[in-house]
Amino acid sequence: MPNHSAVTAARRTAVQPRSSRVGGSLAILTAATLWGTTGTVATQAPSGTPAAATGSAGLLLGGLLLYVTARGVPARTRRERWQLALGAVAVAGYPLTFYPAVQRTGVAVATVIALGCAPVFAGVLGWATTRTRPDTRWMLATPAAVTGCTVLVLGSTTGGGVVDPLGVLLAAGGGLAYACYALIGGRLIAAGRPAGAVMGAMFGGGALLVLPVVLATGPSWLLAPRGTAVAIYLALCTTVLAYRLFAYGLRHTTSQAATTLTLVEPAVAALLGVVVLHERLSVLSRCGMAVLVLALVILAAPTRGSNRAVTRRR
């Protein structure tokens, strides 16, 4: 999910006190840690539960909660309303791709691929829609991300790992979905629309779109204690709470610190995958993951005079 796991640019008009900066950093770190647990928690659903249904149920509840608690007007023009609708489609696409990817290729691999591909897709989409040339970091990170994904797949076919090509494609699809709604949300927020209202509208719309998936796959699993616990956790902790924490953190820390702290998400996902789910990867696949993480580090590196922040989702 995550969060993935939207993009927002904010100008800091005053220096934050040290205590506020520490509190903001802890809030962002907590949010990223929660996003890193999504894949592992989703695997704890009752046996036989479709992966897409698990993620969709979490979005259904969490998205509706974000919508009803949002304040402000998310769109004022017809064009902006169409953008919100497209963003809702992208939000709905995330659980339909990411969670099946986790089921097929493992938590660690699916999370790192989705996070590694999302900035690549965001750069391409931004270039295509605004004719704005991506910056140097993007140009450096893109070949690294593509190389990392390739090595991951090669490592799985030669080393007996858990990665499979369809799982990689689904994870990349999750990265594309995240890039789409992040780009749309970022532009609306930069245009002066309230961040909470924009996110609430997109996630609320996405919740309605995945409702047929939850119903069609059979919601009986939600009646089981484990099913209920998984859906509530994904909704309240990795969606509502994580976004609230991250929004608070962005107001009390620097953009460079925010983007760097969110890199804890793939680390948490990989650690839980190995420790809790006993996932195993070949040496070549681990090298591919390392290259993907390097691409994320390049993207998170601070730039001189930069004052932009990337807001993540799942």
Image (cartoon, rainbow, N blue to C red):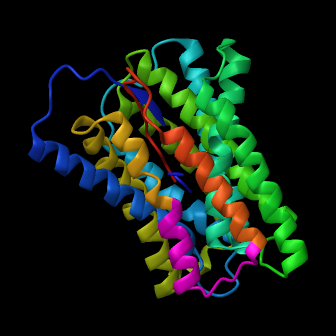
Point 24% across, 35% down: residue: 251
Residue 148 image offset from top left, x and y in percent: 74, 55
Q: Residue at x 15, y 23 (%)?
A: 14
- Magenta span covers which residues? 266-283
- Tell me what residue is drawn at x 47 percent, y 54 percent: 263
- Above or below residue 284? Residue 28 is above
Q: Is residue 287 visible?
A: yes
101 over 194 or under it: above or below: below
**Where is residue 153 shown, x and y percent of the image?**
83, 64
Horizontal placement of 202 versus 86: left or right?
A: left
**Residue at 40% over, 23% down:** 306
Give the image location of residue 145, x and y in percent.
71, 47
Q: Is 43 located above or below residue 36 in the figure? A: below
36 sits left or right of 99 in the view = left
Indicate yes or no whether the magenta region holds residue 267: yes
Viewer-proximal residue among 129 and 134: 134
Residue 274 image-quadrant placement:
bottom right
Relative to 183, does residue 226 appear above or below in the rendering?
Answer: below
Quarter location, residue 250: top left
Q: Is residue 113 magenta?
A: no
Q: Which quadrant, please, contains the N terminus?
A: bottom right
Q: Nearer the viewer, residue 279 or 312?
A: 279
Q: In this rendered view, identify the residue nearer to me: 219 or 158.
A: 158
Quadrant assignment, res 129: top right
Spot occupied by residue 96 in the image (x, y as percentages of width and height)? 69, 57
- Helix, strand or loop for the magenta stretch, by majority: helix
Count the marks: how many?
Answer: 0
Residue 52 visible, this orientation:
no
